[in-house]
Structure formats: C-alpha cells, structure tokens
Image (cartoon, rainbow, N blue to C red):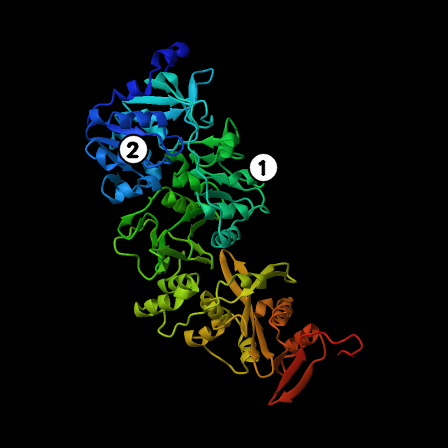
Amino acid sequence: MRFNPEWRQQYQDKLTTADKAVAQIRRGQRVFIGSGAAEPQALVTALAARADYLADNQLIHIRSLGVSPPYTESRYSDRFRYNTFFIGESVRGAVAAGRADYTPIFLSEVPALFKSGRAPVDVALIQVTPPDEHGYCSFGVSVDIVKSASEAARLLVAEVNPRMPRTLGDSFIHINQIDQLVENETPIHEYHQTPADDVARRIGCHISELVEDGSTLQMGIGTIPDSVLDQLSQHRDLGVHTEMLSDGIIHLIETGVVNGIRKTIHRGKVVTSFALGSQRLYDFIDDNPLFEFYPEDYVNDPYIIGRNPRMVAINAALEVDLTGQVCSDSLGAYFYSGIGGQVDFIRGAARSEGGKPIIALPSTAVVEGKRISRIVSMLKPGSGVVTSRGDVHFVVTEFGAVDLHGKSIRERALGLIHIAHPDFRDDLMQAARERRFVYPDQIVVPGVGREELEALESYFVAENGVKAHYRPIEPTDEPLIQELFYRCSERTIYLRFFTYIKAMPHSRAQQFIDVDYDDRLALVATVHEGEREVIIGVGRYSRDPATNYADCAFMVRDDWQDKGVGRYMIERLMEVARRQGITGFTADVLTENTRMMHVFHLSAPGPIQSRIVEGSYHLSFALQPPDEDQPGV
C-alpha cells in the first residue's frame, strides 16, 4: 500500500467528533470495540448514547476494564448484542442473564476469524497514539486482536489519545488506513491487582522452583503470576514471551533478572500482545525498545512459542479433576472467564525444548460462604474442559507441584489428591477408590505439602560430582521406591531387610510412603536420569514414644554406594530428628554389613552402644554430642 506523504492534511480532513463518527453506524452492523485498557472511551460513550437510532447491532469485544459497559444493560437488549471472546467481571452478569454472548476460542485463532470473514467486522472503534512524523499511529497497550480487526473493518474509527503509550513491534497503523479520527485526551484504564495472600505466595514459591535460569516466561494476570515474579529475584537471564504484561515484570527488568539474552527468537526483547496494569507500567513501556508488541496470531502461535527453549507457561484454572482435566472458563454451567491463551501456551511450552506447561490454582475456593475443594473427583455438570488430559503437565497448588504428563490415571489421582487441601484428601481418595482409579487399600498421607517440610530439603554433591536432592518422601514416590528395589542387588536387599525379598508389590511399597513427617519420617535422595527423577537412596526413622529413641535404617542403590550418599542421609536424618526432640537413634545391622557399621561410626555424634542379637548388631547412640570432658568413641 502506498501512503500519501501529505498525511498531516489527511489527518485534519478526517477529524470529527465522537457523536458524528458513530452516527455512520447502521442498524444490524457488527461493531468491533478495542480491547482492555485500550477501549476507546469517548466512542463507547457516544455509541451507547446513539442506542435509540440502532437495532440488532452485534458488539465484538475481548475484555472490558470499565465499569459495566452501558450497552450490556437490559434496556439496550433490542439495540445491542454484546459478544465477547473472554468474559471479564464487568460483563459476567450480562452473559449469565443471557443479554450477552460468549464465544469460546483459542486466542491465537481470533485474528483468522476477522481475516477470513467468518466474523465480519463492519465497523471497528479503536484507540491509538497520535501519529509520529511519518504518519504512523501505535495501537499502544493492545495490539492483540485489535490490529487484525482494524485491517478487516469496512469502516475504521480511531480515538487518538496522547496518553496512550507508544509501543513498538508490529504495532502500527498509518493515518491513510483510518477513516475517521476523534481526538480525546483521557487516562487509559488501569488494572490494579490485589495484594497476594499466603496461598498465592506459596504457589508462587513452588512454581519458581520449576523455573530454570535462562527460561522464557509466559504469565497471566493476578496474584499468582505476580507471586511467581516476586520469587524470581535470584534467577538469571530470564526472557519473556507472553500474551500480556502486568506491573510485576518491571522489577525483574530493572534488576537485570529479565534480559532475554538466552532467547533464540527475539533475543533480548520482551515479546507481548497487550498490557494491563498501572500507569507506572504504561510509562515504562512507552517508546521502550525493549518491548515488542505483536498480534495474537503470532504471539500465541504454539509453533512460535515452542521456539523459545525452556519455555515456562503459567496459567490459572478454576477446577482440576482427578484425571487431569482442567476447567478454566466456567463454574459448572456458569460461564466465568474464557479460554484465552491457555491452550496456546500450554501446547507451545510442551513443544519447547525443556519447556514446562503449568496450571496453577489455590486448593480451595469459597462459594456461597462454604469452602470447597478445587481439586475434584469429577468436574461439575456443565463444566467445560479447556486443557485436556492429554495436554496437562504440571499442576500446582499451595501444597506442591505434580507433573501429570505421561502418567497413568492412578498416578495422576494419587498426585492430585496430595496437593489438594488436607481437609478434602480423604473424600477425594474415597472417590478415587470407588472409581477404581487407585488400589482399594490406597492410603492418604495427611502431612504432605506442609510448608515446614520445605526446610527438610537439601542438596549434596556426591563423590562422583553429581548433585543429589534430598527431600521428604511423597505418596507419588511409590513406583520410584519399587524401581529402587529392583535396581538393587540381592545382597543389598538382604543387608537392608535381613532376608532375600524377591518382590516389592504395592502392599509393601506403600509401607515406605506411610509416614507422618513427625514421629515417622523418610527421606529420599534423588537424581535425574535424562528427564526422569529417580531415587538412589532412602532413609527413615520411627520414634518409640516409650524411650524417645527412633529406629533408623537406610538403603543406597549399588552404583551409588561408597560415594557419601548414605553418610549424608544419616546425618540429615539425625539433624531432622534433633529438631523433633528425639533423644537418640537405634539401628539393627547385620554383622557382615561392615559398610553400614562404618557409616554409623563416622556419623554418630558420640559413643555408640552395641550388642549382638541373633547375628546382628543392635546399635544405640544419643543425637546430642557428649560434653567436652566426657570421653568419646
């Protein structure tokens, strides 16, 4: 397209008032209204005022940040029919009452509706910046679907606002392409997030542990994404490729945590589609070359997303059932929000090398004054599945994170039950038993996910140079315990169990994960073999309330023996036991098990009492070191 260099005169010729501009809209026409914070306020007000002259006009929108839009009121039902691709708070009541429509669709596919004519746009009402010296206006904080709608519209009316930030990227339209211009200087809509509570903070902490240095982030809006960003201050070289930006990103950019230098596409740039936040955010992105804004069919394209290595996509949910189905747009049959970009980014992150698609949600919600679980045995009748069982990967609540990808229904149910709120775990397990998802005798471990258990985690660099992760055992470790058993030699099994055990069925393996994390505790040492976490050692103690001593035992996989793994395990168990007020340890060791005897003698803080009982040493030692004037052993 050739642009008239005399655009300044054209600008003056196209200037009009909001009332005159919307007067060109005819009955029955489809009218697109600019998105989010870029909603053209003067044009929207003028459109509502002209309602008496209109009829059966469909208004196409994605999200309104204003107070309930006037055209969704019941008195306009015969005039306007509002149709949204994402239900915001201001129009939720109108959709529920049947006065407005909701069109569920992947956000990446909306521009194609306009381009193909499947969703024709007769008139587009948008908001832009004043033109630059070449006659180009920026779409500002909302490029998203606005650019595509503008290019498809038969009549394009732009509200020119000098307060709109000038954003860069594929974010421009020339004056020649705009039919009518309305000048209006008014603050653009702001979105202020409520402060994060403890639940959001804990979810953010769990997610931050999944983020590696050099990752590229996608996050939505809300207390959970902001809590994740708050936890990333010690990370390095993070990038951003996200459909939307909020205030939480500013600090990470200013401190150098987000620099994008490890991105392989748009290296060094923050790529986004729209921004929702405070004036501080809008000032920060104004004419800032660090940010590049693109339409949704580019930003949300799973192929483009997947080109970013270690892509971490963080999205919210309303409910997740025990099979991994994710409901994000409805509360039962009541439409609540929208599909948005969730599936786009979940699938894009799944394609990324080292990517991590994450669904995050608090474990409970309050509905009509009653607390309910958001991990459910079955989705409510009428609920829509946004992210399918086949697409789901990580699910995170304040009680932990579980990776469902490639896992059986039994493994999924077990993992999800133990990141649900403890008050609902027994009911969820009973439902899982009734549906034959888990073993009939499957136990619930009440203490899983307690925040204080995080202090029990540690790392140890073994003598072969590999870092092992030591953590409390979890219910989902049952198959890993079985794998550990079958990868140990018969002799290692014999030395640990005092007999030649040939099998480790569920009934026996479940005993290992049956702990209360106080009197009965088990720690596992894990490493990664490829992308899999495997257990290379397990240690446990069980307190005798009569003596306040705890019986202790451990086992290390053969190929990891003599590398310090067992000794560190015993030292960690002793450290944890001291915190729990346990006086000492006892242990039974076969007389031929010289390795284990050696570990105990190296690790014990003081004298070890021992006696032989039926071919094994019965050891006993206090956990507190002896006084300086007391002889040691």
Residue 212: x and y in percent read 54, 49
Q: Secondary structure at mark 2?
A: helix
In the rendered view, does 52 fall on the left or right side of 227?
left
Give the amino acid at mark 1.
Glu
What type is the residue that disc 2 sits on?
Pro
| Residue in view at x 29 percent, y 43 percent | 93
> Could you say where residue 260 lies in the image, as x and y percent from the top left?
54, 38
Q: How many marks?
A: 2
| Tag 2 near tag 1, CB within 8 Å | no
Residue depicted at 30% across the width and 20% down the height: 19
Crowd around label 1: few <14 · some 14–19 · many ≥20 (10 Å): few
Q: Name the spot of residue 582 as percent of width and height, x first.
A: 61, 75
Q: Is residue 182 left or right of residue 400?
A: left
> Is 438 rendered above or below residue 58?
below
Secondary structure state at the residue bearing disc 1 = helix
Does the rendering let one see residue 113?
no
Q: Nearer the viewer, residue 343 or 20?
A: 20
Q: Which residue is mark 2?
A: 70
